[in-house]
Amino acid sequence: MPVGPARMPLFDHLGELRMRLVRIIACLAIAVVVFYMATPIISQFLLQPISPYLPEGTDGLLAGTIVLDPFEAFATRFKISIWTSVVACSPVILWQILAFFLPALKPSERKWFVPTFAAAVSLFIFGTIFCYLIILDPAFQWLTDQAAGLGEVVPRASTYIDMIIKFELGFGFAFELPLIVFYLVIFDIVPYKKLRGSWRTVYVVLMVVSAMATPDASPITMLLMFAALLVLYEGSLLIARVVLRNRIKKQNEELDAEEAEERAAELGIKKAKKSK
């Protein structure tokens, strides 16, 4: 990965930033053109998990969603191509951002960035796969069942595609939780002991995040995301405890020393009050 020197004039830094932005935009532009041509295939792939809740298409193969006008068709295809390009080009985007900021880091910090890059991409992909295989079917089943006694569901392509994209992105970003927990521990932002001891607060926060990240009002999808985040959180703590055991031991010793100092200070204040 080409990385510029740590010390450069301001305009050289701006020039490097422009170069990396141009590379990102060029990659996205090419991907958008390619994926725009393939949007019918991509849309059928996205709709496949919820096909039981869609009417059969006129040709017997495609899902029977409707498009109200040509402008909606263009907007839907463009949205599909944009988000598909962002996901497909995410390794390039992250790589270029990493290459720009890497010179400003210390050598001890640089060693973590390539593993971070690999972990971030892998976790995001795993989150989207989990959503595609596990979440979409029960989510749309619950949503479709809400129309019982009200009327017939007419699946609009733009609405369904937009909802599926939000689901995929929500789970993709939510599955970055282990990376966040790992770095909270490794950079001493929140010690492992506090993360482990504040599990009740963390669980409530995870429940709130699950409610905010799921684009529908379904309790099923919220609970499924909460369960997934819970497993990821506990798993990340376990991995951190194994990989960073020396650092965690040091953190615990520092916390114990701070608590001892606080107790000693409290005792000193109490003694001073009694002496008065």
Image: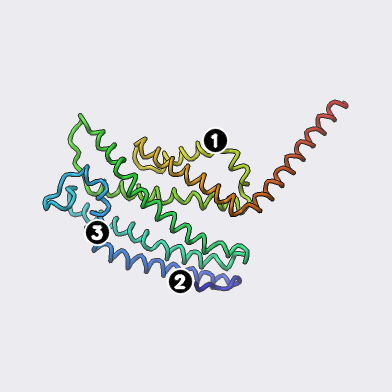
Q: Secondary structure at mark 3?
A: helix
Checking the image for residue 183, the label placed there is none
Inter-mark Cα distance, 3 to 2:
30 Å
Residue drawn 44% across and 59% down? Answer: 121
The mark closer to the camera, 3 or 2, is: 3
User: Mark 2 and mark 3 in contact (Cβ < 8 Å)?
Assistant: no
Left or right: where 89 falls relative to 102: left
Does the rendering let one see residue 46? yes
| Callout 1 crowding tier (Cα within 10 Å): few <14, some 14–19, many ≥20 | few
Determine whether 17 is above or below 203 in the image. below
Residue 266, horizontal then vertical, whole percent: 78, 33
Q: Residue furthest right?
A: 275
- Numbered tag placed on residue 39 in the rendering: 3
Determine the image quadrant of residue 269: top right
SS state under label 2 = helix
Of the 4 image quadrants, the one containing the C terminus is top right
Residue receiving disc 2: 19
Type of the residue with mark 2: Met
Residue 114 position within the rendered picture, expressed as x and y whole percent measured from the top left: 52, 64
Q: Which mark is residue 200?
A: 1
Q: Give the x, y percent position of residue 201.
A: 54, 36
Residue 75: tell me if it is visible: no
The amino acid on which the numbered mark 1 sits, given as a three-letter code, is: Arg
